[in-house]
Each structure stands twice: as C-alpha cells, then as structure tokens.
Image: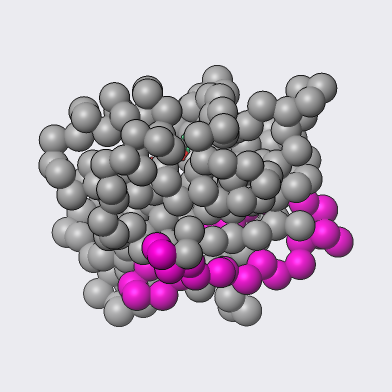
Amino acid sequence: VIQVFLCALDFCIDRDVLLRELAPEERQRAQRFRRSRDRDRWVASRLFLRRCLANALATTPDKITLLTGINGKPHLTGTCGAPALRFNLSHSGSRAILALSDAAEVGIDIEFARHFPDMLRVANRVFTAGERAQLGNSANPDFARRFYQVWTCKEAVIKATGEGMAADLQAIEIDLQDDGQPRLIRYDGIPGELHLQQLLAGDGYVAALASQATARTMTPVKVTKLEPASI
Ligand SMILES: CC(C)(COP(=O)(O)OP(=O)(O)OC[C@H]1O[C@@H](n2cnc3c(N)ncnc32)[C@H](O)[C@@H]1OP(=O)(O)O)[C@@H](O)C(=O)NCCC(=O)NCCS
C-alpha cells in the first residue's frame, strides 16, 4: 500500500517541540539556513516527516532513526536489512509531500509551478528531445504546467531509485500521455519497472509519484491533506 500526505509548512513551532522531536544533527542543519523562513519551513517538513513515520510505526517522533543511502536517500532501519516502511519526502515553497509504502521503493516530487525566464534553456539541458516536443511552444499557457509535469516525474524517478543528483537525466524519458497518466518510456539501466502517477497537489503546485510497485499493486494513490494541527 502506498499513502501520500500533503502538508502546508507555514505553522508556528514551539521551541520545546523542536528540542524534543528533532535529532541533534537536524537542529544543527536548521541553524545553517540563512533565511529564517527557509529554516522554519525545513524544520516544519522534518516534523511532518517524523510525525507521519511515527504514526505509521506506532511510536514517537524522537524514536525514529533516519539513515542516509549512498546518494543521500533517507531510509529507516529495518530488521534483516529491509525496512518495514519505505518513504520519500519532497518540499517546495510552503508545501511538503510524503509518500509512505509498506513494500515498494517510492520517489516523490513537488514543485511550485512558477514561470521563470530561463525555462526554455533549462528544458534544453535536462529534458530529452521527445520530452521537449511535448511541452509545445514556450508562449503557450500550458508550457509551464507541462514543464513541471515532466520535471516532477523525472525527479520522482531519480528519487525512487535513490540516485538523486548522480542520475543521467537524459537517460530517462517521460511520456505525459493524453489521459493525464504519465509513463516512463525509457530509463537506461533501470532495475525493474517504475510506475508514475501525477498527483493533485492544488494551489499552483505540481507533484508526481514514482514507485517500483508492479502494475497490479499500483492502484491510483489519493493525496491526503493534513492540517498542521493534526500532524
Ligand atoms: C534529492 C534530489 C533528487 C531532489 O532535490 P530537490 O528537488 O531539490 O528537493 P526535494 O524537496 O524534492 O527532495 C529533497 C528530499 O529528498 C530526500 N532525498 C535526498 N537525497 C535523495 C536521493 N538521492 N534519493 C531520494 N530522495 C532523496 C530527502 O528527504 C530530502 O529532504 P531534505 O533535503 O529535507 O533532507 C537532488 O538530488 C536534486 O537536487 N536533484 C536535482 C536534479 C536535477 O537537476 N533535476 C532536474 C529535474 S528533471
């Protein structure tokens, strides 16, 4: 089963909560942010992550030990090497989104779909010719939405495999398809199959989920919005 939770990050955090629920290295990382808004949002995303994991594992946030893989993918400890719960987190602007899975590896990405002047240049660098063809003309109002749909799908893929920055983005090809359900049509050297789903994030955000679940187990995943008070 895959669950996806979405949370708005602009909420007040009590200093006691921060001391109680975050690990010392997280509190140190929080101090390295230059802008207080970025720091507060990052701290909120960590609390959101820890509380959701704790809830799923019937424990408390301070008991969650987060380990980091070779390319930086965080994971939980597990018995016999395999964690009982897999997860992936993404944050952008004032939103964080989290995928939890009891079986397959997952990768998730959220982006605020803002238009920026260099979009075409960035698309030429990170998208394949096939992907660029799906974006249409840069003057078209759909260009930015499609740009972020391809972007979030590609990010979700490299986050599911855990490669992150080490991935060759040109080796991955996404087909947005007309029915709104994107498909991974090429990923050179990928282990196993990956399934993609565009998620409804609202408020100008675009999000995608990639999962190593088989087609049979990959039923459409609904996004559960959590209010800060309920996390
Ligand atoms: C981690 C990465 C994959 C995504 O970063 P991002 O989009 O800036 O940030 P997101 O909020 O979506 O994800 C960050 C979270 O992913 C997780 N993460 C970190 N490394 C990861 C990895 N290798 N695999 C999966 N998840 C990872 C962490 O939980 C991290 O949260 P934290 O920063 O609070 O610790 C990073 O490698 C990156 O910046 N890649 C950019 C590659 C690129 O150029 N993409 C173009 C789009 S096609």
Q: Residue at x 54, y 29 (%)?
A: 66
Furthest-right residue in view?
Answer: 216
Q: Residue at x 73, y 33 (%)?
A: 83
Furthest-front residue in view?
Answer: 16
The picture quadrant for ligand 1 comes to top left
Q: Residue at x 63, y 42 (%)?
A: 59
- Residue 173, horizontal then vertical, whole percent: 57, 51
Q: Is residue 215 left or right of residue 161?
A: right
Q: Is residue 102 visible?
A: yes
- Residue 185, horizontal then vertical, whole percent: 66, 54
Q: Is residue 170 above or below residue 182?
A: above
Q: Is residue 205 left or right of residue 80?
A: left
Q: Nearer the viewer, residue 105 or 230?
A: 230
Q: Nearer the viewer, residue 211 or 98?
A: 98
- Asked if residue 224 lies in the magenta stretch, the reply is yes
Name the colouring of the figure: one colour
Q: Is residue 175 visible?
A: no
Magenta span covers which residues? 201-229
Furthest-left residue in view?
Answer: 35
- Residue 37, horizontal then vertical, whole percent: 18, 49
* Snapshot quadrant of residue 104: top right
- Residue 29, horizontal then vertical, whole percent: 30, 28
- Asked if residue 125 lies in the magenta stretch, the reply is no
Q: Is residue 18 above or below residue 9?
A: above
Q: Residue at x 47, y 64 (%)?
A: 230
Q: Is residue 79 above or below residue 130?
A: above
Q: Image quadrant for the N terminus?
A: bottom right
* Snapshot quadrant of residue 175: bottom right
* Snapshot quadrant of residue 178: bottom right
